[in-house]
Amino acid sequence: MFDFSFGELALVAVIAIIALGPKDIPRIAFQIGKWLKQFNYTKYTLERQFDLFMDKETKKRDPDALNIKDEPATKETLSDE
């Protein structure tokens, strides 16, 4: 997703140390970690609610739509193609 090289990350780290100071970086990193954790949890919750809603709506419209039966591939099923 993000394409950062080691040199770019090192440059950002050096700038952060200069701008924020070495004492504040752990506290700020911890806070950013908490924000990312909350963001991922919220994203997961919304995705899960959306998926459940869509499954419920699909089932209302076509009750057999979610009853997909997987058949194992055999020579007979593959030779029909």
Image (cartoon, rainbow, N blue to C red):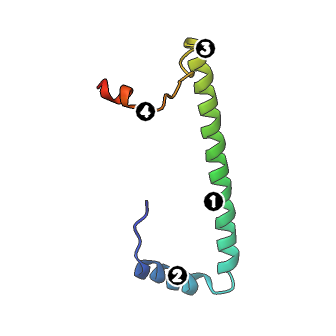
Q: CA distance from mark 4 to mark 2?
A: 53 Å
The extreme left residue here reads 81
Q: CA distance from mark 3 to mark 4?
A: 31 Å
Residue 52 position, x and y percent, is: 64, 30
Judged left or right of residue 67, residue 77 is left
- Residue that badge 4 annotates: 73
Q: CA distance from mark 3 to mark 1?
A: 36 Å
Residue 1: image quadrant is bottom left
Looking at the rendered image, the disc whose residue lies closer to the viewer, 4 or 1, is 4
- Residue that badge 2 annotates: 13
- Residue that badge 1 annotates: 36
Q: Are marks 1 and 2 in contact (CB under 8 Å)?
A: no
Residue 34 position, x and y percent, is: 69, 62
**Residue type, label 3:** Lys
Q: Is 57 placed above or below 23 here?
A: above
Say the numbered circle drawn on residue 60: 3
Q: CA distance from mark 3 to mark 2?
A: 53 Å
- Point out the tag, 3 or 2, that comes first from the N-terminus: 2
- Point out the tag, 3 or 4, that comes first from the N-terminus: 3
Residue 33: image quadrant is bottom right
Looking at the rendered image, the disc whose residue lies closer to the viewer, 3 or 2, is 3
